[in-house]
Amino acid sequence: MSAVRHRLLAAAVSVPLLVGALGACGYGSEAKKDTAASVAPKGPKTDGLDQVRIGLFGNTTHATPLVGLQKGLFQKELGGTQVKSSTFNAGPAEIEALNSNAIDIGWIGPSPAINGYVKSHGKSLKIISGSASGGVSLVVNPKKIKSLDDLKGKTIATPQLGNTQDVALLNFLADKGYKVDATSGKGDVTVQRTDNKVTPAAFQEGSIDGAWVPEPTASKLVAAGGKTILDEKKLWKDGKFVITNVIVSQKFLKDHPKAVEAVLRGSVKTNAWIRTHPQEAKQALNAKLADSNVAGKALPGDIIDPAFKNIDITDDPLAATLQEEADHAVKAGLLKKPDLKGIYDLTLLNKVLKSEGKKPVDDAGLGS
């Protein structure tokens, strides 16, 4: 048995609430050392705080915090309060950090946000903004899979049991008429839960026939000879679905609303800058990824270019799609019907958007 196969088997996890570990991307579980912004704190402290601690992932779906940190846009809004970041490899670890008061605000995927909210009976967190949409594809070995009708008997990887992409694949396969046991991944199509760091090697070795994965893993597979046969955007109305949210500890939101508002101003201004300076933003993103405390390595052009292009930066949390993603998990048998009422508090975001001359965003009836 190959080393890759051993690692694939080790990646399988058990199923508590939303099947245990709900990582947005399934990048492991350890957090890297806190890193400060590249711009020094200057001016009065916001809300009297010495620092605001944010959590993020070192990948392209977290372009907003990575670019905002690299360009000093969050620090500018926080003045004399230092912004510090911790890079996480998976959603569960970030939720744990939020619950243990190790971070105050985090960028995270929809599934771990749902899980964290439901497990705490609505007391741990609030979603306060959107950040990114899209950036997820089904990439396959074109020698083994020619079309979406060729999936039967094949092995398709997802990042983590019960994570956002895992739920999406299970829902897609069910709609196509394939029968798959959600927990084991066995059935007409084998769903192999595989850490994204392992997926490219597994793909090249032939242990998997394809993968339903986020960026930049999808572009890594294409660079390795894979073919994209489905962009998940095609499955959603207007091609939009949430891949990254901004969450905050409810206690921090209550105690330090000015600091939260400052971070949201930094987020909105960063997103606006990314949209108007795409090439510079891509370079800033890659520079931050090269930080040893983030990913430790910049992405080559044939990966960063398509990976960045496939992400849609947005302030809108796309709340209706969060409910739909939760419904997909229920349908797959991975989640009991959750009550998401109150998961959003978009008050401060809409205040910031108004001050920037932008339209308010909607919570789809799931607000406080």
Image (tube, rainbow, N blue to C red):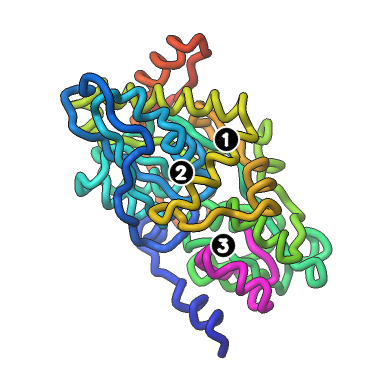
Residue 83 in percent (x, y) is at 30, 35
Between disc 1 and disc 3, whose residue precedes?
A: 3
Residue type at numbered disc 3: Thr
Residue ID for mark 2? 110
Q: Is any atom of residue 117 visible in this view? A: no
**Left or right of residue 358: residue 38:** left
Q: Residues within 10 Å of mark 1 (few under 14, many from 20)?
A: many
Up-down: is 208 above or below 322?
Answer: below
Q: Secondary structure at mark 1?
A: helix
Residue ID for mark 3? 158
**Left or right of residue 42: residue 237:** right
Between disc 1 and disc 2, whose residue precedes?
A: 2
Residue ID for mark 1? 281
Magenta residues? Answer: 191-213
Residue 41 in percent (x, y) is at 28, 29
Q: Residue at x 64, y 55 (%)?
A: 300
Q: Residue at x 33, y 48 (%)?
A: 86
